[in-house]
Amino acid sequence: MTAVVSDARPAASTVGGHWIDDWRPEDPAFWNNGGATIARRNLILSIFSEHIGFSVWTLWSVLVLFLGPAYGIDPAQKFLLTAVPTLVGATLRIPYTFAVARFGGRNWTVISAALLLVPSVAAAFLIKPGVSFGTLLILGALAGVGGGNFASSMANINAYYPDRLKGWALGINAGGGNLGVAAVQLVGLFVLAVFGAGSPGIVAGVYIPLIVIAAVGSALYMDNLSQARNEKRGMRDAAKESHTWVMSVLYIGTFGSFIGFGFAFGQVLQVQFAEQFDTPIKAAYLTFLGPLLGSFVRPVGGALADRLGGAKVTFVNFIGMAIGASIVLVAAQQRSLPLYIVGFIILFVLSGLGNGSTYKMIPAIFRQKYAGDDHQARRISGAVIGIAGAVGAVGGVLVNLAFRQSFLTYKDADAAYIAFIAFYALCVLITWAVYLRPAARTRIAV
């Protein structure tokens, strides 16, 4: 057997443009001789930029709490205001996935961070009584640019780490980004407590200097990998895989729930329990808790999937989510606020766990399907992660539209909760039929 001698040359970026032309993370000598340090530096800056992106994306989950009677905006319109940035962000995830290989990870992080200034500056100066609903919709749509940052950040960090560390690196990257949902709500709570409900622009204004720091820090300290390329026809081939669409449906149930409830929770509290939450600050005291817990447990979902199997964790997780939604439904009917909060906390925590377990299923599925062809497995699974991430985010739109239609038609959210229970039950059935049923032809041990 011929021995393979590792080149122990340290990883180093060229002086011009921060490009790294030689990147071999699977080589232990290369990794230990500077590669790990460079990857860690890029990961830290990527997490910070993605975190700010998530905060800007979910900015309107907070800003709608400031839109009191002086704005003339009814609850149905508020749910539309939160659905619009969710939809724009979901749509942008596909092109953002390709952008890293096209422009370079560092370059695109700088660009995508700088783009966050547009919705933040606009919201900081334009939201005031008398502004038209159409203008608010445009401002909400602009905030959608933050939703694409997740896809480009994950694609970038995926290229830096060896296979044995990808799960950890991507889990930390995703969890740090998801925390932006809770962070913006804490910022909103601070502004409400200190400045009152008449100063929504301050919430957006807080992020302007942070965006500048993210863009400048990325420009100074991140790198581009010249070997990073979009796999030719990867998306097209992934779209032909039935597992792509199965996992996209499951991701609607997990990440779609997380981001959808993150946007809608504060509004639902104000409408469902108007007597207890007659001021925005009372709702703001609770809205950050669910997204915070859901973000922290996302890596736990991945770890459980590694140990017990992603399909088993996802299967049990959806059963739990159906139970959580049922608790919320019963609490709403009985007007029990404590039980209602418990039900929603269960939904947030389990949606976070499910984010981790479903994402871990994707590479496992294609490693087994393309056993012996590691390149094909990575090529397809990478594209599927991009597609599922975009489709899953659409679930956030559906959550907000479900609440909007339920309040419009029935004057309460019960119909929306019933729809969520039915969808989670469908996800339980799909997971069992495709990945757990012993007699299933398509069974894959994930």
Image: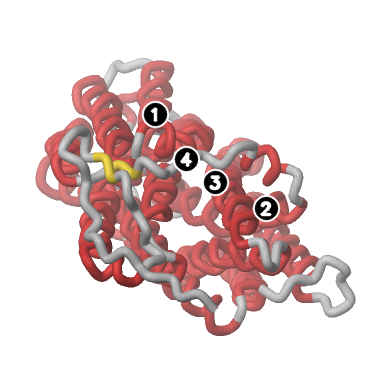
Q: In the visual, does 15 lie left or right of 49? A: left
Q: CA distance from mark 3 to mark 2?
A: 14 Å
Q: Nearer the viewer, residue 13 or 334?
A: 13
- Give residue 199's position: percent from left, percent from top: 17, 33
In the rendered structure, which amino acid carries the disc numbered 4?
Arg
Seen at 18% across and 33% down, the residue is 16
SS under mark 2: helix
| Dot 1 crowding, Cα within 10 Å, few <14, some 14–19, many 20+ | many
Could you say where residue 423 lies in the image, as x and y percent from the top left? 70, 57
Q: Which of disc 2 and disc 1 is earlier in sequence? A: 1
Q: Circle 3 sits in a helix, a strand or a loop, which is it? A: helix
The CA span between labels 4 and 2 is 28 Å
- Which is nearer the N-term, disc 4 or disc 2? 4
Whole-angstrom CA distance, mark 1 to mark 3, is 23 Å
**Which residue is tagged 3?**
386
Q: Amino acid at mark 1?
A: Gly
Res 234 → quadrant: top right
Give the CA distance from mark 1 to mark 2. 26 Å
Left or right? Give the position of 246 relative to 77: right
Residue ID for mark 4: 229
Contact check, label 4 and label 2, Cβ < 8 Å:
no
Residue mark closest to the camera, 4 vs 1: 4
Q: Are marks 3 and 4 in contact (CB under 8 Å)?
A: no
Q: Secondary structure at mark 1?
A: helix
* Residue type marked 2: Val
Residue depicted at 69% across the width and 51% down the height: 244
Q: How many angstroms separate mark 4 from mark 1 (CA)?
A: 32 Å
Q: Which mark is residue 140?
A: 1
Query: Which one is in front, 371 or 333?
Result: 371
Name the N-terminal-most of marks 1 and 3. Answer: 1
Instruction: Give residue 249's mark.
Output: 2
- What quarter of the picture does the N terminus occupy? bottom right
